Amino acid sequence: MSALESAAKSHLSVDALNIERLDLAYRVRGRDLKVLRDVTLRIGPGEAYGLVGESGCGKSTVALAVVRYLPPNGRVLGGTIRVGGQDLLSLGREDLRRLRATTVSMVSQDPARALNPSMRVGEQIAEIFRLRGLAAAEPRENTIAMLESVRIGDPKSVRDRYPHQLSGGMQQRVAIAMALSSNPKLLILDEPTTGLDATVEAEILDLLQALRTERATSILFISHNLSVISRMCDRVGVLYAGALVEEGPTAEVFTDARHPYTVGLIRCLPRQGAHKDHRRLDTIPGLPPSPGDDARGCLFAPRCGLAEERCHADAPAMSELEGRSSRCHFQERAQMLPGNAADGPDAEGVRRAATAPHSAPPILQAIALSKTFGTQRHPIHALHEVSLQLWPGETLGLVGESGSGKSTLARLLLGLVQPDAGGIVELDGKPLPATSRARRPDQLKSVQIVFQNPDSALNRSHSIRRLVGRALSRLGRVPEQTRHTRLLELIRSVKLADRYLNLRPRELSGGLKQRVAIARAFAGDPRIVVCDELTSALDVSVQAAILNLLTDLQLKHNVSYIFISHDLATVRYVSDRIAVLYLGRLMEIGPAERVFSGPHHPYTAALLSAAPLKGEMPSATALPTGCVFHTRCPCKRGPVCEQQPPPLQPGAEPGHEIRCHIPVSELPGRMTKT
Amino acid sequence: MSLYWRLLVRSGPFMTGLLIIVFWGACAVFGHLAVPFDPYEADILSALDPPSGSHWFGTDQLGRDVFSRVVVGARDILEVAPLATVLGVTLGVMLGLVTGYFRGIVDDVVGRIIDALLALPLVIIALLALTALGASSMTVVVVIGFIFAPLVARTVRAAVLSERDLDYVAAATLRNEHTIYILFVEILPNVMGPIVVEATVRLGYAIFVVATLSFVGFGIQPPSPDWGLAVSESYGLINGGIWWPVLFNTLAIASLVIGVNLTADGIRGVVDA
């Protein structure tokens, strides 16, 4: 029997990964902080196992432990890890090297950092063949075969390119090709699609599905994204505070969770068709324990709506019931976890005035806004003649892939970037000066923004008191005497405790920082707040709380939101109307439900169906002629699409418009679930 | 800030360097009270005595006690060099904030001037300027300060460039903050790390330049017991076997420069970490 055959045989019989009772700690300032507690899991041959949990729960630590690549202060306190039958923890340096070269591979979140920027793609893949001792065996052909296997259309040219010459999705394909080049038994995917756009994510997930059936490689798929896991994995494990709290077949876990934490996590997600007017989102109260906190009872008990005395006193063990495992004393009752979401203002389904036909004049109006960056000889067309309106008290969702011009549009409205000649922004029907510097104080305070990344948006050397207080004095014009009272009111209205006032941003968690940013934006009683991807860096339970907060503030102050996000479920939940951008063009705009149900623009359809689009987004320096979407459009009608820019034609109802040559009645619609 | 202190206290180079600086600082301030001889009093009868029980570092050509002169000689250089550094850093920070924040023509012009300055040795430029202005401690401070300003500005500018595009600056513009406020209250605190590192590094250079200028006669003037001056007065005697005035004064200069550089290393390690 050749080596290959014996390898193939062991492939079929031995677990790809077997972790038993793993305890792991990071040593910080002389103390062992436990980050993994009693983790037991196995991944069978050819199985895809998903590991979900919120940030800080230990997901990535599991991945690093499996390749034994922990930081120097990480220590395994007990338990075993077997990869392909080999005891990982007892391996010497050489054996470990061999294991990493032949048995287990890892794909990390950020391909731009995982690939060597100074080596051509082909050389990087060939390096792996060399490590496996296959140098002689035609590295060029092997490399091309690998690139073909990850569905790269033009492998010969990609092989000779450097990573920075490839798009994010291509880079991730190359990273996957590299991981598969060693023909591993176990492939670890650590948030492989988190940094990618929806349509690119769809492509990568499709690719991974196809590779799974081709190669029978076992997969450990780590993600915070429940829908990605449910699409990709056979079984799923839910990690909370370093402990596996639930495990079982994916479909069953997500439809009928047996641990209150899983139940809570799933309920935090905006559900299909749910809207803020009907019901708020459920949240998980409290915070996860910090590493090193050793509670006597169940780790989740302090946040659990079902917790009884017993839960606080003794820690539950993983117990099995009907083929499912859960670390809960009352797993059969988990689904009875009480919800904590309030009803929306229109629980009965009556829509608010904001979405009623707009009789009132719009509060904000963008007229033919264009923005060209770059030089005259090398112009970059970021935005082209976008016109839209915003009515008081409504939320306008702005969707599109990265590079579609969402953020540029937001910055134009705020006056942070100056539009090309001809574009006008009007507030209450009167034109706003193009730059924020030229705007009057009352105009400035009317339009504010909450940025995506609070680490960049909050000055790290200022205290929370100063950050919010300064906004109160500058925008709110609150006099010295009443400022402290107003400050406390404002801080409390975003549900921050008074004691945070003297802290600096880095001492707060991501969700708390974003609340500070929201408080600052609301300091001057704004009428319009731009929310630029403000929940995309947050965990789902935190996101739910922030979305609820935004909804409450909107009701209280009748502000309008421009809500930018790439997460369609979230946009659908918060938006009254939605605008879809592609390559700086407004492709579709209309009431949220209409945009989601169709008939809609072929691009909107592609975004919603999570179906991959063909080709790559053209560069903004060399735009396609005619309709900019024609190069990727699945419904292309012929030369007219290539030659003439399509008109913005009326859609299915008043206020619904679609930029397409195809008559509305023939456009795709009634798409399936997202 | 307290976190930085804790890390600094644990840093070996920083504490060693600080100890050396504090030692020389104490010599500069209290040295004259503790020395065995009057550093200015000549005693021709015991000129050029080698080190002995009464004159630990020997005597110079006028019979003055070298040990006493080395101890008290810390005073002038520790006045001139730090003052020059403070002047250079202050000017440099303002220049760096402005050029980094506004970019544009000012930035281009200052950038080219800095390039030109870097092409010439510091000491040469200082010599030219001092010849024109006349040598005194005050002119040394001003000349070194002005030469350092663009060099400091370059470091500050680089730090400001990565701050100015952060969203907190955009948020400040949306509050209609004055540019001065944005520069000094929003941005400056976030670039303090590189500034402190740059300032310590500059202090090391300043000491070195001041000693060199004194050596060539354009720095601190006689009868100061300044180290550079003392070396220049006595280096010709080495050929005659009189090594002690030169050796102990050069050791003093070297130890102070090393002390400052160790401190700078320590601070850099903490700031960059």
Image: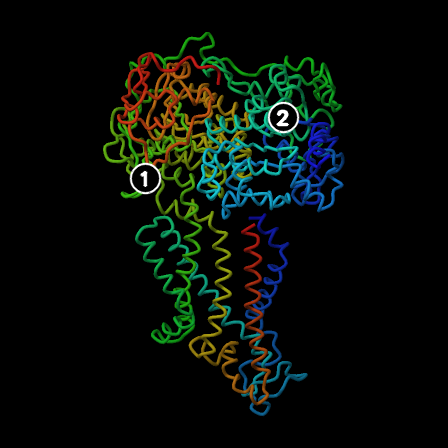
- Would you call the spot at circle 2 few (<14 residues within 10 Å), some (14-19), or many (20 or more)? many
Q: Is residue A566 above or below residue A462?
A: above
- Disc 2 marks a residue whose amino acid type is Ala
Kind of element beneath mark 2: strand
Is residue A558 visible in this depiction of the protein?
A: no
- Chain assignment, label 2: A
* Residue that carries the numbered disc 1 in the rendered image: A373
- Give the percent coordinates (x, y) of residue B58: 61, 84
Foreground: B72 or A666?
A666
Kind of element beneath mark 1: strand
Q: Are marks 2 and 1 on the same chain?
A: yes
* Residue that carries the numbered disc 2 in the rendered image: A48
- Chain assignment, label 1: A
Foreground: A605 or A209?
A209
From the viewer's perspective, tell me whether residue A630 is left or right of residue B36: left
Q: Which mark is residue B211?
A: none
Q: Is residue A434 above or below residue A332?
A: below
From the viewer's perspective, tell me whether residue A70 is left or right of residue B40: right
Q: Nearer the viewer, mark 2 or mark 1?
A: 2
Q: Residue at x 60, y 30 (%)?
A: A222
- Would you call the spot at circle 1 few (<14 residues within 10 Å), some (14-19), or many (20 or more)? some
From the viewer's perspective, tell me whether residue B242 is left or right of residue B118: right
Foreground: B265 or A246?
A246
User: Mark 2 or mark 1: which comes first in sequence?
Assistant: 2
- Give the percent coordinates (x, y) of residue B191: 46, 50
- Disc 1 marks a residue whose amino acid type is Phe
- Give the percent coordinates (x, y) of residue A207: 53, 28
Foreground: A408 or A545?
A408
